Image (spheres, rainbow, N blue to C red):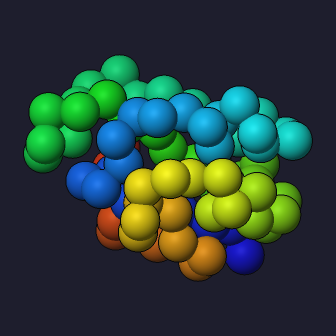
Amino acid sequence: MPHTIVSDICEGVAQCSEACPVGCIKPASNKNIKGTNFYWIEFETCIDCGVCLQVCPVKGAVIAEERSDLQKNPT
């Protein structure tokens, strides 16, 4: 099951994007409710390796389940 980046918690640090072995973590073109740039996971490409969860320094920004209701539309 793919992981999810919780859009309104993400602070755009991007360590997850740099560490992802399949390149499924992308920057959004808009900002979250905090006014921060955020990232999102392409669920179809995610291989559920958990690297994003391990490297993210923002508590609660990445969760180990697919939750499209917590991950905003990237556009």
Q: Where is residue 12 in the image (x, y as percent from the top left)?
A: 40, 34
Q: Which of 24 and 37 is in front in this view?
A: 37
Residue 67 location (% of width, % of height) = 46, 72
Point out the image quarter for the N terminus.
Answer: bottom right
Examine the rendered structure and indicate whether residue 38 appears above or below residue 41: above
The residue positioned 77% from the left and 48% from the top of the image is: 45
Q: In this view, does 57 lie to the left or right of 74?
A: right
Q: In which quarter of the image is residue 66?
A: bottom right
Q: Nearer the viewer, residue 73 or 6?
A: 6
User: What's the residue at 36%, 48% (across, down)?
Assistant: 10
In the rendered image of this protein, does residue 32 appear above or below residue 31? below
Q: Can residue 5 be seen in this view?
A: no
Q: Which residue is drawn at 12% across and 45% down?
A: 33
Q: Is residue 70 left or right of residue 21?
A: left
**Quadrant of the snapshot with the C terminus:** top left
How many circles with numbers are drawn on the protein?
Answer: 0
Would residue 58 be seen by someone viewing this image from the given angle?
yes
**Does residue 63 appear left or right of residue 70 in this picture?**
right
For residue 4, above or below residue 34: below
Q: Nearer the viewer, residue 2 or 36?
A: 36
- The residue drawn where x is 30% and y is 56% is 9
Task: Name the spot of residue 54 as percent of width and height, x first.
Answer: 69, 62
Location of residue 23 in the rendering, given as x and y in whole percent from the top left corner: 77, 34
In the picture as drawn, the residue positioned furthest to the top comes out as: 29
